[in-house]
Image (spheres, rainbow, N blue to C red):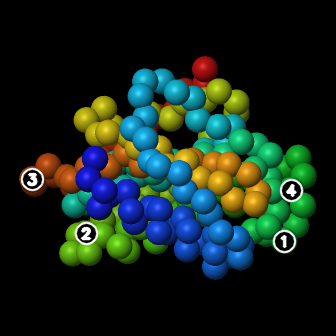
Amino acid sequence: MDQNYILPFIKSTRNIFETMFQMSVEVSDPVVRKGDSPSHDVSGIIGMSGDTEGSVVLSFPMETARRIVTVFTGQEVGENLEDLSDAVGELVNMIAGGAKAQFAGQKVSISCPSVVIGSSHSVYGRKDAVCVTIPCACDCGEFNVEVSTRPAAKGVGTQGAPASRAA
């Protein structure tokens, strides 16, 4: 995958965490995701369409998600998974929106976020796009940004929504 599709997500993730949470994000080397490796416990998912199409998945272990959402909202996250889901959806929306703004000269739209909560779930993107996992860590714990994008085929600007499966 072209690094021009990965760097905007790294920059956007760092920017969101630095400005919204006043915490830095350590980014490890991106790796191509192989096979059916499960995501963490909480995954925020956004589809992309237009000149660039695919999906973005922001994936956390449950404890990391709770810590980040507590910092984000200023309130302890209890057992209400609806609040956790809303906050993770907004976070993936901000990261995808920030990355989208860096695709200079391209028309790109992002979908409304979806959130999957549950251990050992897997999120599948387009079969014709390579999925790159960007491992990240911050003061709240480790998480991944998974990017599966590609240039749109000529004359085509739509993409199907990613599917999820509990293992």
Q: Residue at x 86, y 56 (%)?
A: 77
Q: For the residues marked 2 and 1, what is the alpha-carbon distance in whole angstroms?
A: 35 Å
Does residue 49 appear to the left or right of 63 in the view shown? left
Q: Residues within 10 Å of mark 2 (few under 14, many from 20)?
A: few
Type of amino acid under label 4: Val
Are the residues at dot 2 and dot 1 in contact (C-beta closer than 8 Å)? no
Q: For the residues marked 3 and 2, what is the alpha-carbon distance in whole angstroms?
A: 13 Å
Q: Earlier in the sequence, mark 3 or mark 1?
A: 1
Are the residues at dot 3 and dot 1 in contact (C-beta closer than 8 Å)? no
Type of amino acid under label 2: Lys
Q: Residues within 10 Å of mark 3 (few under 14, many from 20)?
A: few
Mark linked to residue 77: 4
Mark linked to residue 116: none
Q: Which residue is mark 2?
A: 107
- Give coordinates of residue 50: x percent, y percent: 25, 60
Q: Residues within 10 Å of mark 1 (few under 14, many from 20)?
A: few
Type of amino acid under label 3: Lys
Whether residue 52 is visible here, answered yes or no, is yes
Viewer-nearest of discs 3 and 1 = 1
Q: For the residues marked 4 and 3, what is the alpha-carbon distance in whole angstroms?
A: 45 Å
Mark linked to residue 154: 3
Are the residues at dot 3 and dot 2 in contact (C-beta closer than 8 Å)? no
Q: Name the foreground residue: 4 vs 40.
A: 4
> Disc 2 on helix, strand or loop?
loop
Q: Name the foreground residue: 52 vs 131.
A: 131
Q: For the residues marked 2 and 4, what is the alpha-carbon distance in whole angstroms?
A: 37 Å
